[in-house]
Amino acid sequence: MRSIPVDLFETPRSRATLGSTVDNPLSVLDLTLRTREAVESKVRSVWVRGEISDFKRHRNGHWYFSLRDRAAQIPCVVWLADQYRMPAAPDDGMQVVLFGSMTVFAARGTLQLKVTRIDAEGDGLWRKAMELTLAKLRKEGLLDESRKRPIPHYPKCIAVVTSADGAALRDIVAVMRERNLGARVVVCPTQVQGDTAALEIAAAIRRIGRWGKADVVIVGRGGGSNDDLWAFNDERVARAVAGCAMPVISAVGHEVDTTVCDAVADLRAPTPSAAAAAACASRDDVRKTLALAQRRISESAQTRIRAERQELEKIGRSIAHLSSRIVAHKKALLGACAARLNALSPLATLSRGYAVARDKDGRALTSARQFSKDLKFDLLLHDGEVAARADEVSPTDRQQ
């Protein structure tokens, strides 16, 4: 530790009292406290670049490590209360840029850098924090594709969680007006960056869920740096999205930006404008859908008519075939019956040489007693009739 001139600790009182003589020395605590006061008053907060080494997480939650380069190193501390500003704890060997102020740790009399912000070279620290959050959510199944819900094509109400005065909201509203399907847009304004943004976004999503009248929710903002977008990588926001009763579209930043909110949402849109387009169909889409439906209905009806016509033709052929069989069977039965009737018919008897006598009323005269002299009658033969008259009647006593 560099030596500090004694006059940094001198005050009008100290010249006359503490530390001015061998009989009135300073205590070690007084010395370290005065040293800390002098250091903190003379050295302003600064950005420092270096490499992380010997990182340790104390049981009280504070982080301790060294920041070094090729020529020197300095102890660093990150108090638990300041860690919320940092995406994740750094790893040993990580190149970082720190922001902090010099102080003295009185208990050991050591000079150290009190860090309030850490930016890794590139996106290493942001990527690590995001990967840790994603791994935790993936273990719980919140990233599974099977739990993602479809976005309704024709929503009546679309809720938007974003900044009330941001470009994202203007883009969403512009797209909705252009598509003009009469969907109601409800905005739940919130901060989208800063220390309180994550809490506000999560609270807004839960508020919409309790309201329960939206068909789909758009959560997002315009582009920005990793720091600007970091609220949408917060675990609290991710859990609010996963727990939302309605399908959620995430539209954070530009197309190249990816967040934890994107991974958990039911649909990730590359931009807020794309999210608005995905949330509802346009008039042209509706016309195309209706035309396609009409064509499909017509084709389905024609197909059904052809199928029914073929079925009717098949039934007709079956009926005709069955009718022919029935007619043939009936003809055979009729022929058999005709043959039997013919065998029993009087005409058949007549054809064998017999004749039948009938009176003028056509009644058969079957007994000689029915005849009288000069009775006119007809004699029926197999091939015609003969008019006759009885000249003489000779009945016998034998029963006919």
Image (cartoon, grey):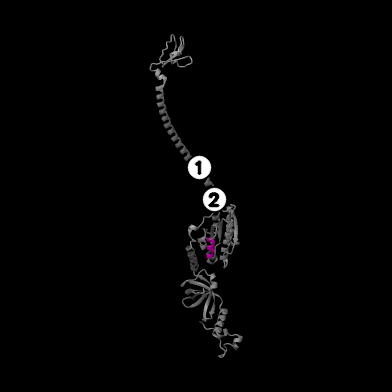
- Residue 320: x %, y % from top left: 44, 33
**Badge 2 amino acid:** Asp
Residue of label 2: 285
Query: Over which residues does the magenta segment extend?
Result: 235-242
Q: Quadrant of the C terminus?
A: top left
Q: Considering only vertical position in the picture, is 153 above or below 132?
A: above
Task: Bin the neighbour count of mark 1 within 10 Å (Cα to Cα): few under 14, some 14-19, many 20 and up.
Answer: few
Question: For this rendering, which residue is in front, 361 or 82?
Answer: 361
Indicate the quadrant where residue 166 lies: bottom right
Residue of label 1: 301
- Residue 169: x %, y % from top left: 58, 59
**Badge 1 amino acid:** Ala
Residue 388 within the magenta-colored segment of the rendering: no
Question: For this rendering, which residue is in front, 120 or 360?
Answer: 360
Magenta segment's dominant SS is helix
Earlier residue among tags 1 and 2: 2
- Does residue 259 appear in this view? no
Give SS at disc 2.
helix
Indicate the quadrant where residue 354 lies: top left
